[in-house]
Amino acid sequence: MNYDIEVDNISKQFVKPDVQALEDINFNVKTGSLFGLIGADGAGKTTLFRILTTLLLADNGSAKVHGRDVVKDFKILRSLIGYMPGRFSLYTDLSVEENLQFFATLHKTTIEAGYHLIKDIYRQIEPFKNRRAGQLSGGMKQKLALSCALIHQPKVLFLDEPTTGVDAVSRKEFWNMLKNIKNQGVTILVSTPYMDEAVLCDEIALIQNGKILSIAPPSTIIAQFPDVLYSVSGSQIGKLLEDVSKFQDIKSCFSFGDTIHVTLNQGDIKGLQKELIQRGHPEVVIDTIVPTIEDCFIRLMQ
Amino acid sequence: MEPIIFTKNLTKKFGDFIAVNNISFSVEKGEIFGFLGANGAGKTTAMKMLCGLLVPTSGLGKVAGYDISTQSDSIKRRIGYMSQKFSLYEDLTVRENMQFFGGIYGLRNKEIQKKIEYYHDLWSNNEMFDGLVGSLPLGWKQKVAFATAMMHDPDIVFLDEPTGGVDPIVRRQFWELIYKASDQGTTIFVTTHYMDEAEYCNRVSIMVDGEIAAMDSPKNLKIAYHTDTMDDVFYQLARKAQRSETV
């Protein structure tokens, strides 16, 4: 098996404020795959990205990207990777085309040489190529940043929260673009706080407070959910949640949109149904459901 | 009873560009109103007009009984606002931030103290109040920002993507705070990109290209668009947008 990212016992502590940002992180990303780092703000995702993109030194451990050590081989590595940071980091007073030109030149290449890789993305913003980057909408900025990160045809692409604050429709579009980039042979590490995006990755790591909770393909993580999961729905969802949480055998209960997801310590789900009817929810419907990644994440957090 | 937010043909133009186009809607007291839309649909512009930060080009709007064009100062006293960017002072403690913002809204020390005690009891996390805000985890920062926006018991609180990036458990705890405030009569006006959170609202509106394309309870919207998720309702409406990528 070939790996394009190999992370070996990486730890990083910050002094002020005193936080253990990363603690013994281990994972490998297969060459040509799309790997997702799923976790909330403050989980350590950005710190890990900065270490893997040679911008920050780890306290302990080592990491290789495309077979090169992130510390010793940092110079070579920088030409082999593309990095799109979470914050928009292009030159706002340069035009769209000038930004792209700039990044191509930095990597001693031309727009033409890498055009095939960014074609589908860049074509959407090309009509505005003379506009200053600072004047672009959020969606267009994102496309330009992605184009600039890809123009030198990197082997490995790092995307730090590319869809945070992006609406549901644009998020879908963005993930389609990622799939196309992956199909052209680029290995991708992407981070996101949106649990629903996890299923679009080949493999994911769930990360919380600097520690990895679980690493596996999303379908495996879902299959490993140890309890039977029920969805409970009724007409007064607020009161229903309150009454469900009072049931003696409840192990967990969390609202998911217009339903409540429930697991039990023991006992029969019929007992819950009976009690809810007694407590004034005659219309209550309980089904057995397949967990989502968010269910798995919540369980692992506890 | 008069609605707490009321707009009629509210419009904002920037030059030739119509950011908000003739929107008319009302929100009742105590309601949790979800204000949805794709990036660039005009949500922020509309919200700024409602908060008295931007004067409409045409149309009418009333918030907490005051006219948004002529009485914006009175509106600002009656609303709370929590921005998607964290806006507390990181180098002040939680207590100091609350005292500061309470002071800005003209609360007496006694009233501020009462509020702090309320959250003391609610959160039973006493050490936190004397720690610097900058060192709090994001989830707590967002809860503190909400509490600070609620210091002066506003009639309406505007929440702009309050749960962006927070973990799934804190996200749900945050919504418990919202429910509590709504039960006590505060009107909640909230934007989010999480479609499961749209389900927690009494009613939602979905803006597309500066107009309100749909507005109803999540349940009725799902019936009207023949689907069982709000995600799909949103997708059906927002993908018709023409302008989001050109602005």
Image (cartoon, helix red, strand yellow):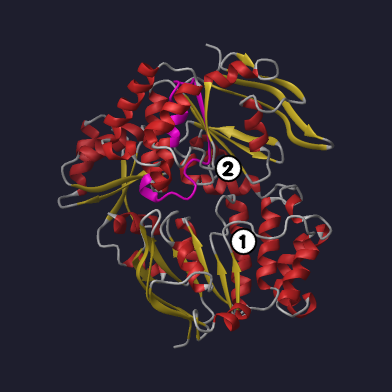
| Residue extent of the magenta highlight | B145-170
Left or right: B49, with A226 as reference point = right
Name the residue: 32% across, 40% down.
Answer: B128
- What whole-number distance in Å separates the C-alpha atoms at marks 2 and 1? 24 Å
Label 2 marks a residue whose chain is B
Left or right: A8, with A201 as reference point = left
Left or right: A61, with B209 as reference point = left
Label 1 marks a residue whose chain is A
Q: Using the image, determine if residue A15 lies above or below residue B29.
A: below
Name the residue: 52% across, 11% down.
Answer: B1
Q: Position of residue B149 (x, y in %)?
A: 47, 29
What's the mark number on residue A174? 1
Q: Position of residue A72 (x, y in %)?
A: 50, 83
Label 1: how many Cα within 10 Å (few below 14, some 14–19, many 20+)? some
Query: Total marks drawn?
Result: 2
Label 2: how many Cα within 10 Å (few below 14, some 14–19, many 20+)? some
Q: Camera-side residue: B40 or A14?
A: A14
Q: Using the image, determine if residue A14 lies above or below residue B95.
A: below
Q: Position of residue A20 (x, y in %)?
A: 35, 61
Q: Using the image, determine if residue A28 lies above or below residue A302.
A: below
The C terminus of chain A: image quadrant: bottom left
Name the residue: 30% across, 67% down.
Answer: A224
Q: Residue under label 2, please give it.
A: B225
The stretch drawn in magenta includes residue B74: no
Amino acid at dot 2: Tyr
Q: Camera-side residue: A99 or A290?
A: A99
